[in-house]
Image (cartoon, coloured by chain):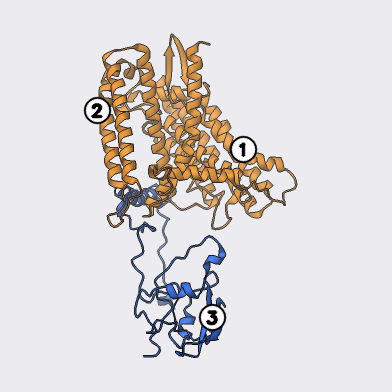
Chain colours: A orange, B blue
Amino acid sequence: MSTASIIVALITFVLGALLALLTIPVLVWLERRTAGLVQDRLGPNRTNILGFRLGGVVQSFADVVKLLLKEEYYPNHIKMGRWLFMLAPIITFSAALLAFMVIPFADTIIIDGEALRMQPLPLEYGVFWYLAIGAIGVIGVIFGGWLSHNKYSLLGAMRGASMVISYELALGLAIISFILTYNTVDFNAMVQWQSNTFFSFLPAWGILIQPLASIVLIIALFAEINRNPFSVAEGESEIVAGFMTEYSAMKFAMYFMGEYVAMNTASAVIITMVFGGYQLPWVSTQMLLDNFSYFAYALIIIVPVFVGWMIRFMKRNNRVRSSVSHDGGREFETKVLSLVLIFMAIVIDTILLYLALVPNALATQIAVSLLQIMIFVVKLMAFNMFFILIRWTLPRFRYDQIQTIGWYYLLPLSLFNLFITALVVVGVNQ
Amino acid sequence: MKQNIITTPRHGDNFKDKLFLPAIYEGCKVTFKHFFTNLNDSNAVDTLEYPEEQPRDITNRYRGLHRLTHRPDDTIACVACFMCATACPSECIFIQATQREDNVDEKMPLSFAIDTLECVFCGYCVEACPCDAIRMDTGIFSLTGIKREDFVLNKEQLLSHKGAFGEEISCARD
């Protein structure tokens, strides 16, 4: 093992952990603010540290502190299987976290002739890992519901179990269509395949090559992560909080966080399989490496424009109404954040300009990787936003309706799609 | 009989509805529109930024916190007749009567306390009062405290409240 490989392994691991764990508070905040804005409210925007509200994201960290400091309450009526009761949320959380770890954040980086994968777990069979680990999450739900000795919990867990049998087949068949198309089970190779073009001008993204399988995959993943419109395992109007009714404090937080990590994982899988992963459309990694100076010049223009837009947005929205006399430090916050953004833009521009003017193979490779990670994060957050907005758009399906959708619509659709895909793949290869 | 039968149109039987996706698209159009409009100008969202912005829609019939009114000579209007305490459905008014020494009237309350944690703000005490001595026209809608005792308002506190609407002094004897 060379030093470079150890450094890359460490960096990818830290990055994977950060992307999975640090996005939880951000996602919770996004969810609440989005819900507010969709419903013509504002959402949490008051919590601050020394006047810094950051749009209210501090609220999520306050919530984490609250959940950590809460009394560790254990329901008295649970006599047997206490350890399993504690283990259940951990299963859900760690399954979601582990499934995220096979997503490539950037293309394989080659340092000194050594190919280093930008995945926290550098596996070549990522799809199988994701399918295996991702399906375990629901076991935590079922354990939790069963061991709670509570009718609501049990009903929630049963609904969760009924969900599994409705979507798993369609999900698996949709993924098999993708495996046939890309001819690989490696997430990174899938992304590389998607940097091609077809019909000589369309990017070969999954959504364009396999539209049917993409839709089935997205719907099935909505079901897998227990999210609206398929969030039947909990139903506040009929079964309280479903399987997590008896859970409190950090045990509840594990389920709660697991839900968001799972959402993050599902977004990552969708963008990796369907939306070209860390790639820009039409731009392969080799093209990025060969023409990095052009991309650097483009970025030098884009970054200040983006920062200017951010500052304008803050100036317009991070202020109080004219009817309110004092602004609670918002103007000061806008000023400081604007200065930080401008400083960051200058630093990034300087580095990019240096890289564009003084070509250096290693530095270019690292810069390309960073750029791909940035693209990945942007796509990831965009798809998370999609998940959140869908949640606040649609009502819940009944669990038998989900089974109907899964067995009567998604399964025949994905089988049909698999059949066509197989025919086309065989036809093209001959 | 036949003309009494109304056939309600059923939705969801045609192909477009069974596809679900067009309906989801329609729904997303609405939510996305709200989201981006509000994101673009969050100050235009029609909410009250409460502690800084106070409600502007409190009418003069609003039943706020209670107050004890004064006579024209600035003494207490209450004659400790216990009408309000009798009318009170939540039994939160506690009055101790005493002899009035200043020859304005015969009786006055020695203490007059309202437990606002018990109070349901029904306004029966105001209706029952023969002397227009208790009113709920202060327009005060929030009372905060850090212990339960803070919410039991005594005579001095009730007398210090100012009326927000209408007459400041008791109208009973004019």
Q: Residue beneath label 2, please?
A: A301
Q: Amino acid at mark 2?
A: Ile
The residue at 32%/19% (across/down) is A288
Q: Residue beneath label 3, please?
A: B110
- Which image quarter holds the C terminus of chain A? top left
Residue A229: numbered disc: none
The residue at 72%/49% (across/down) is A78
Q: Chain of mark 2?
A: A
Compared with B89, A85 (above or below) is above
The residues bearing labels 3 and 2 have C-alpha atoms spaced at a distance of 78 Å
Q: Amino acid at mark 3?
A: Leu
Give the camera-side residue of A120 and A228.
A120
Q: Are marks 1 and 2 on the same chain?
A: yes
First-in-chain label (1 vs 2) = 1
Which mark is in front, 1 or 2? 2
Q: Chain of mark 1?
A: A
